[in-house]
Amino acid sequence: MRKYGYLVVEGPHDVEFAYRLLSPSGLKRVQHQKELEPFLSPLIPREYPPKGDLQKRMSTPLFLQNNTHAIAIHNAGGDSQLVNVIMDNMDGEVLEFKKMIGIGIFLDSDSQKSPQNRYDEIKTSLAEKSSQLFILPDEAGTIKKGLPNLGAFVLPDNQTAGTLEDLLLESAEQVYPELLKIARNYVSAAKENANLKSSELSELRNAGTNKAIIGAMANIFKPGKSIQVSIQDNDWLKGKALAEVKRIQAVQTFLKTLFEL
């Protein structure tokens, strides 16, 4: 019997990031429903359109399996929904949490709050909404052992303000150093010299600059390619990135410990 895991993340980039860190353990994407471990099949959406909203995308997790594990990575569609998605799917009629090896959360620390404050909010909310069934450990990035194991990782490193893109930039320094230099110069030139209105540059502030640099690089690999597809297809999280970038290794270790890989 396989061990079952469930990871809830903020967005599609995080889904592919987690997949890339789990794939060295032999976990493969499940494409066809008939191949999916039955225990996880209740996570497949049954209603369309979701809650009557024609503009809302179907929230289908990415399912990964090998001979020993079956893991679902679920895009919550934003940080405000992380706990709600877990609670919606831990009902006894969906997933029996006591049969799971691990339940985890990825969240960014790109807000005005410190990473520890963001973590504490998630911890408090999860405990309250689960009637104290799910109590995270005191420190972000650590695992509370049990059935299931519980933990949440605040990207990029549980201590520093930032996002997943900070880790991708560290990867790019190892894997694509020349392209990274070109992309940084391009984004900087656009900000300073493209005669854009302040409103048109508003998204570049804070974490937006890093996203723009990563997006520019992804478009070189294939024009129009999204960042999440580039993470899946290209070498952002392979080879030297996994071998030499300590902060990426820390996230991978978290996942291996959470799911006992």
Image: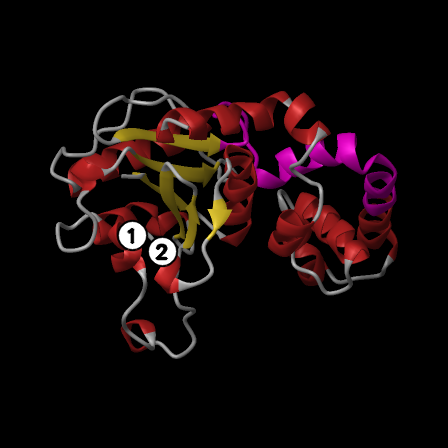
> Looking at the rendering, which quadrant does residue 224 occupy?
bottom right
Distance from Cα at disc 1 to Cα at disc 2: 7 Å
What's under tag 2, amino acid-wise? Leu
| Most foreground residue, 206 or 64 | 64
Circle 2: element type: loop
Q: Is residue 147 found left or right of 112 in the rendered image?
A: left
- Of marks 1 and 2, the one in the foreground: 2
Q: Is residue 175 magenta?
A: yes
Q: Is residue 170 visible?
A: yes
- Residue bearing the label numbered 2: 36
Horizontal and vertical percent position of residue 253: 48, 24
Q: Answer left or right for 180 relative to 227.
A: right
Query: Who's the residue at 71% across and 56% down the image?
Result: 201
Graded by Cα atoms within 10 Å as few (under 14), some (14 to 19) or many (20 or more), the crowding at tag 1 reads: some
Q: Residue 11 shows which numbered tag? A: none
Range covered by the magenta-colored residues: 155-184
Secondary element type, mark 1? helix
Task: State the image coordinates of residue 209 (x, y, percent, origin top left).
Answer: 70, 46
Residue behind mark 1: 40
> Mark 1 and 2 residues: CB-CB less than 8 Å, in contact?
yes
Amino acid type for the residue under numbered disc 1: Leu
